[in-house]
Image: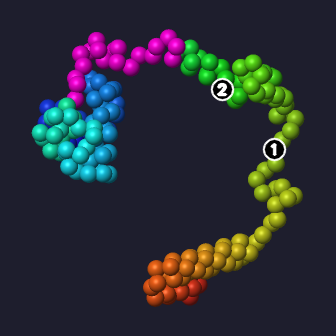
Amino acid sequence: MAQAHFPPHSNFDLLGFFSPVNVSSESRARAFLWLCYHYYESTSPNLNPFGDQYSRRHPGQVPNLKYLSPEEVKLENTDTLEEKEWGLRMKKRRQILVGDGDNSAEIDAGVAKISRRKTDTSQKQRPLAGTSKFIKKRSPVDKASSSISKLNQDQLSEARRLRIINRLRAKEPTPEPEDFRTHLP
């Protein structure tokens, strides 16, 4: 894909295009959107709203990529002070929600109250798998027969769906699926 749509001097493959490279985020985003439009909507370069003069003059090529210097790369995706503060607030909110389970806290002046009690897991042992009194024990034969009946029900519902679809399309009915048990040894 890179050979078909990126300039020869770019040395990109599609996956490398999503990793940190010395191309501006805006031009990478425009190239990605151009590719999406090219494959999902229209291959005509004049119809692609994400194209530029370069992509219109060179059909099949992504819009011109803006290369950055190492200094510009460092400044490219830096968070502003308000973004960092928002991130810290959300981190604190998540810690309150997920938390360590031993505190009660209010989130942002009473929006939601979370109360959790600390439980001592050393006193309470978790039962082993399959030993619960609520789980009905079945023999392997019962399990196999129930799975066979479930598969038959799935086949029946599939056949029913096909009949309905064919009736809506005014086609001949689809033949019933074979019972899979006839193929078992």
Quarter residue 21 falls in = top left
Q: Residue at x 12, y 39 (%)?
A: 57
The residue range painted magenta reads 65-83
- The dot on residue 88 is none
Q: How many marks can you see?
A: 2
Q: Is residue 78 left or right of residue 38?
A: right
Q: Earlier in the sequence, mark 2 or mark 1?
A: 2
Element class at badge 2: helix
Frontmost residue, 61 versus 71: 61
Q: Is residue 82 magenta?
A: yes
Q: Residue at x 62, y 18 (%)?
A: 89
Instruction: Pick out the residue farthest to the left.
Output: 57
Quarter residue 70 falls in = top left
Query: Label 1: which residue?
Result: 126
Query: Label 2: which residue?
Result: 94
Q: Residue at x 46, y 84 (%)?
A: 170
Q: Residue at x 27, y 25 (%)?
A: 23
Residue 101 x/y as whole percent: 77, 27
